[in-house]
Amino acid sequence: MRSHLLSFTLIAAACAPTACSKPSESSPATATSTSASAANAPSAASPSAPQAAAFAPSMLAAFAALPAPSGALDDKASLGRMLYFEARLSKNHDVSCNSCHKLDGFGVDGQATSEGHKKQHGGRNAPTVFNASLHFRQFWDGRAADVEEQATGPIANPIEMASDEPRVVATLTSMPEYVAAFKKAFPEAKEPISLKNVGVAIGAYERLLVTPGRFDKYLAGDKAALTAAELEGLATFSQTGCPACHAGPTFGGAMYQKIGLVKPWPNAKDEGRFAVTKQDADKLTFKVPSLRNIAKTGPYFHDGATVALADAVRLMARHQLGKELADDEVKRIVTFLEALTATPAPALVAPPALPKSTDKTPKPDPS
Ligand code: HEC
Ligand code: HEC
């Protein structure tokens, strides 16, 4: 699994100092395109309607195929799948990972901000768990290193699942099936049931939730996998300068960027990564999200303020690149982004059978 990280790091490194961290310079994709206007972005916003971009194979250089995990559930991932659907990890037995990241709903909940314990809402939109394991950090502000570390966060978060380690350990220890499954998944561990190992098992499962689709088939040489309209859209996406930040196998997830880089973003309430580092340079800086399955994961942005993908595309061009897109350019980009929709194998995301509570299982607590 770590080999994914390696190839991902190479991609991130390939576009690091020049293109990706400074979108004002041309990305590897736009540099080889025929457009001069793309290379001048974002400072020189062009008022005249640009010509429809023509697809060139060199535009593909900024991207990469997703790895295709075998989908086989080993002992850790199979336990992780149970825990992913396990609402008894929450204080009131009513919230699981799947409540906010629905696996039959592209890994999101379709809400601007999610509902957790006692129907409380946090301030941020739930990103999809599909392909998240490939991101260089987790959360909008990157405060967790990987999916294993991330998974322990919501369980203890008072407005998400509102539990804590003693309660989680007591709950899982009360059901013999879980005791056996943890022993099998962590044969070396003295005390297999811990919050950390819950995270490790869920992380192992999440690493299988990768969604290669038609775009990856195209990269692998199947020229019929994308339509002419989708390739035209890819050309507009590239020529506009989007791959400066949205590149690699997940079209994002490889760097932090300021929201409103060229034109200030209206909502400056959430200061993003600044809350983690307290560095001025990190004010309003967020992890660039993945665009895989983006047509299915709205509402958009860290605050979920934008519902239509076309609006999100227009706002990105304006605020990140200083460009006003014409309606047909927005439409072309959306057509391309829709081609990034794909799901994991149905058997992998089907809810598993969960063990029955025993009289030792802590009772639901609505307080
Ligand atoms: C109450 C809703 C809720 C629950 C329950 C929840 N999450 Fe989340 N999840 C969110 C929100 C909101 C964020 C973004 C928070 C942030 O960035 O500060 C998030 C972020 C994530 C991310 C980061 C993805 C990325 O691209 O950075 C992953 C992975 C994830 N959650 C997995 C899980 C797992 C695994 C569980 C169960 C242990 C879980 N979540 C439970 C709402 C929820
Ligand atoms: C300078 C870097 C940068 C450029 C260039 C850029 N983006 Fe973004 N993009 C971001 C960041 C950062 C976010 C997250 C912003 C937030 O929510 O705070 C984002 C978010 C998005 C989202 C919402 C994702 C989600 O899950 O909510 C979409 C859609 C998107 N970008 C599309 C595009 C398109 C299309 C282009 C080209 C027109 C583009 N972006 C150009 C950095 C960039």
Image: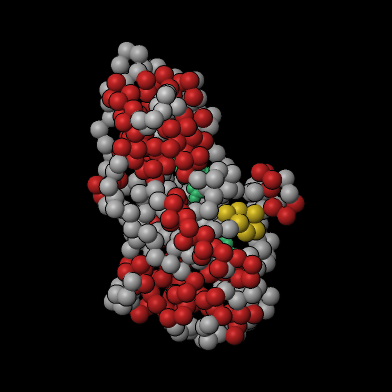
Which x, y percent locates residue 138? 52, 47
* Residue drawn at (56%, 80%) of the image: 31
Along the viewing direction, whichever of 155 and 68 lies nearer the viewer: 68
Examine the image and state in which quarter residue 65 appears: bottom left
Quick check: 60 left or right of 354? Answer: right
* Residue drawn at (52%, 83%) of the image: 33
Along the viewing direction, whichever of 211 and 307 lies nearer the viewer: 211
* Residue drawn at (75%, 51%) of the image: 280
Q: How many marks?
A: 0
Relative to 267, residue 225 above or below:
below
Question: Which residue reaches farthest top?
Answer: 359
Question: Which residue reaches farthest front?
Answer: 188
* Residue drawn at (41%, 28%) of the image: 189
Q: Is residue 37 visible?
A: yes
Quick check: 46 left or right of 211? Answer: right
Which x, y percent locates residue 317? 58, 69
Which x, y percent locates residue 351? 28, 39
Relative to 4, residue 363 above or below:
above
Along the viewing direction, whichever of 253 and 13 lies nearer the viewer: 13
Which x, y percent locates residue 47? 63, 82
Relative to 210, residue 230 above or below:
below
Q: Is residue 114 visible?
A: no
Along the viewing direction, whichever of 164 and 198 lies nearer the viewer: 198
Quick check: 25 left or right of 101? Answer: right
